[in-house]
Image (cartoon, helix red, strand yellow):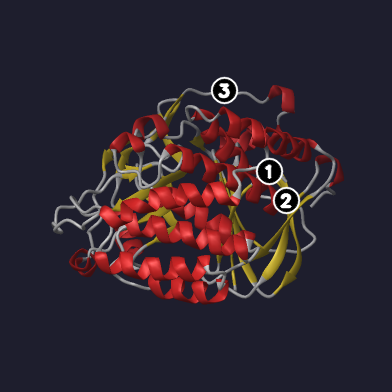
Amino acid sequence: MINTTSKTEKWNKARKIHQELHGQRAKQKTLALALSVLLTSGYTIEAAAQELSIPCDEAEEKALAEAKANEVERITAFTPATPLERVNPRYPTTAVRKGREGWVRLSYVIDEEGRVKDPVVEDFFGSPSFKRSALSAVKKWQYNPALKDGEPTQQCHQAVQLDFAIDGKTGATRKFIKAYKNVDEIFKAGNIEAADEALKELLSWDTLNRYENAWLLNLESQIAREQSDIEREAKSLTRLLSSNGQKRFNNAVFDDDYVAYVLQRKILLDAQRGYYAEALKSYSRLQEMEEQQPRIEEVAAIVNQIKTSIASEKNLQVPVSMGDNGRWFHTLVRNQFAFNNIQGELDTVEVRCDSHREKFTVAEAHVWHIPQSWGQCQVMVKGDSETTFDLVEVAKGLASAG
């Protein structure tokens, strides 16, 4: 367990930020859509710099997979896809009228004709109508296709976050402030379960803006921590970061120091959950922040333990509950994985890597081997919402032929 900011210090900091809520007035809503396209890697809007630059070609990847490890190298000229047309999502009329804001995070593939294929919603916050609008828009996006040796080729594992925001709308409404203070007071009085019920009621409001979303997610993470629910706390913190905005655009809800605390906390939680790729991603982001060396040093030992575990000859096991939407995503840190202790129904597993993708039916006691040349891979599992299982990232020396 690392020594993060004490609970008292954390609450003092949160209360200091909380004063902003009391001085805010929600400005008059406008119908102007301020839609920004934020790539999930680094949460920036520099689209060209974030586009993947690896081809998705089965013939080449088969050849690379069959080569010896020390012979695998890039043997073809490749030019990444470039945006040609990106249609803005339609802002749902009801959401605009009610002032509701949020975001949708998706992944997709660009085919040989520059079209978006198989977009998948990884997560969202706000109105469910945002998902439909985002998917509809992304399917219409057009790229100049990636080129390999002068010929069009697929480009895999694109990731994007679409923000739904109303121009000029900032701060919290007086109605929200009153309700939030009520939940906050119940929580601080130590009645955690009652606070959780009151929070869920507030989260169901269909008028919440981005600023209010961020504050509610922050409170949810604190309630989850008191309940020792690390899955819920980690998810709330991840969503908080997606809702927070950015300092560079002067729209951040929380300041850099609190964002650094959130990243630090996420590293610890993701290490405990076995989400090592996410922990390392948060650590990289923390390292990029200014004046955060003390926090970086505090989690350095945890990061070193993660790296040691990844390199070890022990299997890495991640206990999973599918959840309401029947989909689960996980970024792998090894190129061999298997399923174990399946309780319920699992339909398919799709592996989306930097340069290749495959889709399989799920089989227990089978080890999937992914060629190193495919790059980093994400597993997407579909199944019944009540299903539980263990995903096992298999150590190199322990895998049998599948």
Between marks 2 and 3 in the image, the one whose residue lies nearer the viewer: 2
Which secondary structure lies at badge 3?
Answer: loop
Seen from the viewer's position, the closer of residues 353 and 256 is 256
Point out the tag, 2 or 1, that comes first from the N-terminus.
Answer: 2
**In the image, is residue 203 above or below residue 265?**
below
Seen from the viewer's position, the closer of residues 12 and 194 is 12
Q: CA distance from mark 2 to mark 1?
A: 9 Å
Quadrant in the rendering for residue 69: top right
- One can see residue 129 in this view: no
- Please say if the residues under marks 2 and 1 sit with CB atoms less than 8 Å apart: yes
* Crowd rating for badge 2 (residues with CA inside 10 Å; few <14, some 14–19, many 20+): many
Quadrant in the rendering for residue 391: bottom right
Point out the tag, 3 or 1, that comes first from the N-terminus.
Answer: 3
Between marks 3 and 1 in the image, the one whose residue lies nearer the viewer: 1
User: The disc labelled 3 sits on which kind of residue?
Assistant: Ile
Residue drawn where x is 62% and y is 75% of the image: 386
Q: Give how far across and how far down residue 15 sits, in percent.
A: 43, 52
Q: Give how far across and how far down residue 238 sits, in percent.
A: 50, 52
Q: CA distance from mark 3 to mark 1?
A: 19 Å
Q: Would residue 350 appear left or right of 172 to someone viewing this image? A: right
User: Which label sits on residue 370?
Assistant: 1
Which secondary structure lies at badge 2?
Answer: strand
- Please say if the residues under marks 2 and 3 sit with CB atoms less than 8 Å apart: no
Circle 2 is placed at which residue position? 337
Circle 3 is placed at which residue position? 75
